[in-house]
Image (cartoon, helix red, strand yellow):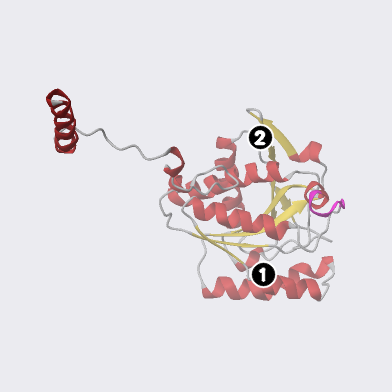
Amino acid sequence: MKKTLQIWMSIIFLLFIFPVVLQFLPKEPTIPPAFSLKEPSKIVYASNILEEDIAPKVEGNVLIYTTHSHEAYEPITKAADGKIAASHHSENIMKVGSKLKDNLNVNGVTAEQLDLDIVRVMQQEKIPYHRSYAAIRPYVKEKVEKKSYDLVIDLHRDSLGPSRTTITHENQRYAKVGFVVGKEHPFFEKNLGKAKQLKDQMEQRVPGITREIIIKGGRGVDGKYNQDLDTSMILIELGGVGNTETELNQTISVIGESVSALLTVQ
């Protein structure tokens, strides 16, 4: 009986002293459960630039607008609604311009796009193709008179097929870029100089991504393309009717980096 009592007393003592001993034992670091470990969210842009990689701010302003806002890319319209079209009310060059604006901002350039409401009004009025430059002129004129821009881009889509508007470089496909410069106005040489500078920057990154600069003038040709409104205005033909969204996005990345480099050098 006495032995049994001693055993029970020993057990009670151990139960009492155990929590006290635990307080003095070294503690292992607490590891949270796996599902609570969260990576910081990152925004991935068309050019595969992460938000954390955004370049420092560049001292430069860029304006983007689209004279022919309805111009579209057949692979994109087909993916959107199953219809192959070179003209579209929503899946068009305006959306591409918006992507370019965002990419420029990512590359540290202050970029803006001509008020989309203005463009929509022009679309509703169904401005004939040959009158598009005259119709958009007053809106562009107002913008460049109110604010100084280091580069003004009139963004277009070429009508050429993909065999002539696509290039493969290091296993990546890019939409080729063309430049059109009107020569019948006082700012011709300065506009041409801007086009050459941007072309050179792009070629340094992806050789062959640009086509030859097209200089327009003479009888039966516009010869201005509203480039007489500013000394830093260029007309860009971004890809052709058959280029895909991926190809366009790759080229937008190159344009964004090239414009940023161009404005940093100046």
Image coordinates for residue 166, horizontal then vertical, percent: 74, 38
Whether residue 234 can be seen here: no
Which residue is rendered at x = 80% and y = 40% of the image? 162
Q: Nearer the viewer, mark 2 or mark 1?
A: 1
Q: Nearer the viewer, residue 205 or 85?
A: 85
Classify the position of the N terminus by image quarter: top left
Which residue is rendered at x = 80% and y = 36% of the image? 163
For residue 46: magenta? no
Q: Nearer the viewer, residue 165 or 170?
A: 170
Image position of 131 (left or right of 246): right
Q: Residues within 10 Å of mark 2 (few under 14, many from 20)?
A: some
Which is more N-terminal, label 1 or label 2?
Answer: 1
User: Over which residues does the magenta segment extend?
Assistant: 79-84
For residue 80: magenta? yes
Label 1 SS: helix
Residue 173 position (above or below residue 230): above
Label ID, residue 116: 1
Residue position marked by numbered label 2 in the rendering: 208
Q: Nearer the viewer, residue 152 or 248?
A: 248
Q: Marks 2 and 1, how far apart in space? A: 32 Å
Query: Which residue, as the protein is rendered here, is positioned at the far top?
Result: 3
Image coordinates for residue 34, horizontal then vertical, percent: 44, 38
Label 2 SS: loop
Q: Amino acid at mark 2?
A: Gly
The tally of labels here is 2
Image coordinates for residue 58, horizontal then vertical, percent: 43, 54
Q: Amino acid at mark 1?
A: Leu
